[in-house]
Every structure is written in C-alpha cells, then in structure tokens.
Amino acid sequence: MGGDTGDGGQGRQPGECGHRAVPHPGDVRIEAWAACREHCLAEAVLALVECFADVSGVRATAVDRVRLAEASDDDLLATLLDEVIFRWEEYGQVPVDVEADEADGGLDVRLAVIGLADVAITGSVPTAVAWEELRIGPDPYGWSCAVRVDA
C-alpha cells in the first residue's frame, strides 16, 4: 500500500494509491485515494493508524479478519474505522497492513496487527469517527475519501 505522497492526492495518476493526515482544530482529518473502493478503504485505515503510531519497520504478530455487512460506502468507511478504533481500545491491536475485498455488497477485511505496546506512539490516539464531512466515492482517478476523527 502507498503512503503520504505529499500532494494530498492532487496530481495523482490513475491507479495510484496513498493517504495523508491533515491537522484539524481538536482532531485530525484523514484523506485516502486508490484505484478502487476497497483499496481506498484500506488506505483510510493506514492513514488512521499513522495519525498516532509509527508502524514502519514492525511486523504483524497476528492476522484478524473482519466481515462488514452490505451498506452504503459512507457506512462502510465509518464502520471500518470504528472497528479499528474498537480493536485498539479493547484489545490493544494496531493494524500494520490491511487488505479489503468486496463480498456480496459488504466487505471482507484482513488486518495484520501488532500490539499497541510494540509501536512508537507519535500522537493522540483517535477515539471516534465524525460523520460530518465524511465522504467516499469515485473520482476522476479512481476513488477517494476523507473523514475527520476525534483525537
């Protein structure tokens, strides 16, 4: 998966993927882009993690699978990010890699995770996904999304 390209997805080429976090008063806005919806959702998870942790150079110690039921694209984005927040609050797990595949309108997600204690914490841990300003959809280069998270 790609990382921050430094241009916020502007000037990207068709098929490119990436993500970034943008400071926002009292919280963080994450943006992600990719060729397809599933990869865009995976990039959003990576952007969420990079808001507060440095997972470069670490290896996953477990793999978890999550099945999200058929829903609107906005609901899938919010539900997936909420699931990731829940997993680090309840189980102390942080995704270091993510794969998502469409499944009957829903989403099958593979989260390669490591313990929160095994990563360098670099910022405030997000606690919730904000519904206002949340968006995901096709764009001229594939798909893009943006969402604000409370930190």
Image: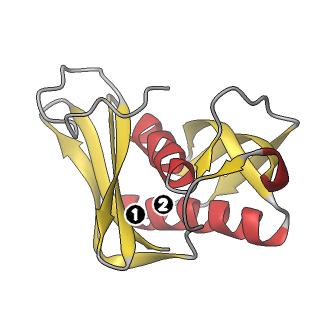
How many discs appear?
Answer: 2
Circle 1 residue: 72
**What secondary structure is found at the residue carrying circle 2?**
helix
Circle 2 residue: 76
Does residue 16 sit above or below 32 in this rendering? Answer: above
Nearer to us in this view, 25 or 18: 25
Q: Residue at x 65, y 44 (%)?
A: 109
Does residue 76 sit above or below 64 in this rendering? Answer: below
Tell me where residue 55 sits by quadrant. Answer: top right
Residue 42 screen position, x and y as percent: 51, 41
Colour pattern of the rendering:
secondary structure
Q: Are marks 1 and 2 in contact (CB under 8 Å)?
A: yes
Residue 52 screen position, x and y as percent: 56, 56
Nearer to us in this view, 136 or 27: 27
* Left or right of residue 72, residue 111 in this image: right
* Left or right of residue 39, residue 22 in this image: left
Crowd class of label 2 (few under 14; some 14 to 19; many from 20; radius 10 Å):
some
Q: Which residue type does callout 2 highlight?
A: Leu
**What secondary structure is found at the residue carrying circle 1?**
loop
Does residue 99 sit above or below 21 in this rendering? Answer: above
* Left or right of residue 65, residue 95 in this image: left
Q: Which residue type does callout 1 highlight?
A: Ser
Q: Which residue is drawn at 36% across and 34% down?
A: 4
Q: Residue at x 27, y 44 (%)?
A: 144
Does residue 35 sit above or below 91 in this rendering? Answer: above
Badge number at residue 35: none
Residue 136 screen position, x and y as percent: 30, 55
Residue 76 screen position, x and y as percent: 48, 60
Crowd class of label 1 (few under 14; some 14 to 19; many from 20; radius 10 Å):
few
Q: Distance between the residues labelled 1 and 2?
A: 6 Å
